[in-house]
Amino acid sequence: MGTAEIDRERAAAFMDEMRIVLNHGMAATMIGLGHRVGLFDAMATFDGGGASVGQIAVAAELDERYVHEWLNTMTTAGVVVYDGRTDRYALPREHAAALTRAAGMANMASYAQYISMFGCVEDELVECFRNGGGIPYPAYERFHDVMAESSNMRFDALLVRVVLPMVPGLIDQLREGIHVADVACGQGHAINVMAKAFPNSTFVGIDFSDDALDRGRAEAAEWGLDNATFVSADAADLDQVDEYDFMTTFDAVHDQARPQAMVNAIHRALRPGSYWLCADIRASSHVGENMDHPMGTFMYAVSCQHCMSVSLAYDGEGLGAMWGVQRAKQMFADAGFSHIVVNTVDYDPTNNYYVCHKPV
């Protein structure tokens, strides 16, 4: 640091902010851990009332000593309320509404898992910062599971009831019977949800991860679906022409090594007059317009540690999660989509829903 005088009040205030960041960061790792082992769900069974460490450990079927230390962390973080007179811990109902599996897509504890998950690739990220390149998908051991958990909550709550009706005339078409593809489908839950809701239509899930596709196939078999199939392919190399009546992608374009090639391939594969529904991160393409984004820091960090990095690992463009609405609309127009409508859902602050029309 130079010899120039600094504003000591400003420096002290920033130091306080950094302590808050560090405390919140560690709290987030423990929130994700508590989600994984079911502690929030166990505490919710007491319906906002207090319970002893032993009672909570028994309810969660976990080791009491670890539960005690976790509870103290959550207490100092303001997540759990501690009563020193009775030595009991409580999860208020208002907190349970944002931390338990019963909360569905409002469960913020599920998203906390990303923070610890990315810790497993920190050494590889250090090398990327120094030498460039990226980190391939297989290095992220739990990514598909964590991503599927958060996505599936959204699909179950919104896909059929809220999202699909954004596309003009689509629900009637699905009821009558059309051919649908979900590109970069991951574990395929969206395909299976749609296939279950619309048995007269046929659905194809496309992804290059065989492990993820096997999960989709297993779920389809469990649900008894005979109108859902899964195909291994690179989204940028699809060679179908005028094949599908409707196509979807969910938080997938920004991860691709060749995103423009993927969008071009989707345009080719759609029949003229049909629609592509693209859900992707709600943001501006300009960082200065994302200062008030409710998950801005989180999403830029996820992008750096995963979305951008996996693209670069495959000699890709490294588009990143926060590519933003301006760049998305330009990319879609360059592919040939003539009419692009951007929809949002109040209780899904994460995504934009782009309804893109292929002209006749």
Image (cartoon, rainbow, N blue to C red):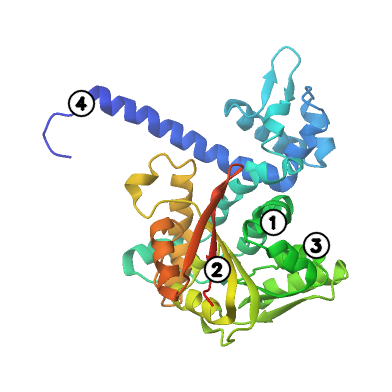
Q: Earlier in the sequence, mark 1 or mark 3?
A: 1
Vertical side of 136 occupied by 121: above or below: above
Q: CA distance from mark 1 to mark 2?
A: 30 Å
Instruction: Tell me if label 4 and label 1 are in contact, CB under 8 Å.
Output: no
Q: Is residue 151 visible?
A: no
The reply to whether dot 3 and dot 4 touch (C-beta < 8 Å) is: no
- Up the image or down, 142 lies above or below 13; here it is below
Task: Place residue 289 in its image quadrant.
Answer: top left
Q: Amino acid at mark 2?
A: Ala
Q: Is residue 271 above or below residue 172?
A: below
Percent position of residue 248, x then y: 61, 68
Counting residues from the start of the chain, the first of labels 1 and 2 encountered is 2
Q: CA distance from mark 1 to mark 3?
A: 10 Å
State the residue position of label 1. Answer: 159
Amino acid type at mark 1: Leu
Whether residue 80 is visible, yes or no, is yes
* Residue 165: quadrant of the picture: bottom right
In this rendering, which labeled residue sits more in front, label 3 or label 4? 3
Residue 7, label in figure: 4
Q: Nearer the viewer, residue 355 or 223?
A: 355
